[in-house]
Amino acid sequence: MSIELFIYLASIVGDIKAVIGLTTIAFFMVMAVYGITTSIDSYEQQQKIAARHGIITAIDDGYNSEYIKNRVNIRNKLMITTFVLAIVSALLPNERTMYMIAGAHIGKEAIESETASKIHKIIDKKLDEYMLQLEGDKK
């Protein structure tokens, strides 16, 4: 990945994190409403089954049980999506961290370059010369 693209992504990561956070909250609210309404529908379905075996007769064409299963499937998918979005939001680094990662990467490339190796050798040689000169001045 080029450093320009990385810096661009670092600049928008805060906005992405905010959008993911708001989406997670919205999904959580939808999931809560879905859970409540599914529970109410399930209670009504249980009442119809109880009525069928009791004094009151209820007509059930099978629609309600399939309807409940579909709602539970949707609720489960919402739960999984909300959980994944929450994890992504928590693990997504902030803009400052992204810039630190870019700086560390560039610094590592600079240190490992051939030019840096040559500069290191020159500095070592000059330091050795200065050390010999200092030892000669002390005598």
Image (cartoon, grey):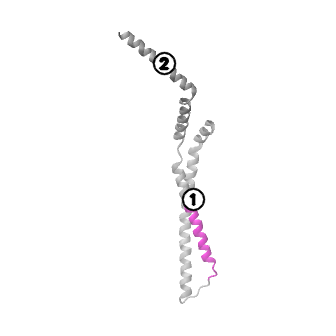
Residue plotted at (62% across, 73% down): 67
Left or right of 12 on screen, residue 137: left
Does residue 95 belong to the magenta stretch?
A: no
Query: Residue 92: where, in percent of width, then height?
Result: 54, 47
Residue plotted at (51% across, 50% down): 90
Query: Residue 40: where, in percent of width, then height?
Result: 54, 73
Residue situated in front as seen by the camera: 102 or 115: 115
Query: Residue 52: where, in percent of width, then height?
Result: 56, 86
Residue situated in front as seen by the camera: 126 or 61: 126
- Neighbourhood count class around disc 2 (C-alpha, 10 Å): few under 14, some 14–19, many 20 upward: few
Is 78 situated above or below 95? below
Pick the quarter of the image with the C terminus.
Answer: top left
Magenta stretch, overall SS: helix
Q: Which residues are magenta?
A: 60-79
The residue positioned farthest toward the left in the image shown: 139
- Neighbourhood count class around disc 1 (C-alpha, 10 Å): few under 14, some 14–19, many 20 upward: some
* Amino acid at circle 1: Thr
Q: Which structural element holds mark 1? A: helix
Is 112 situated above or below 85? above
First-in-chain label (2 vs 1): 1
Q: Give me the C-alpha separation between circle 2 and circle 1.
A: 60 Å
* Disc assigned to residue 81: 1
Q: Quadrant of residue 70?
A: bottom right
Identify the residue under disc 2.
Answer: 125
Residue plotted at (56% across, 49% down): 18
Q: Which structural element holds mark 2? A: helix
Pick the quarter of the image with the N terminus.
Answer: top right
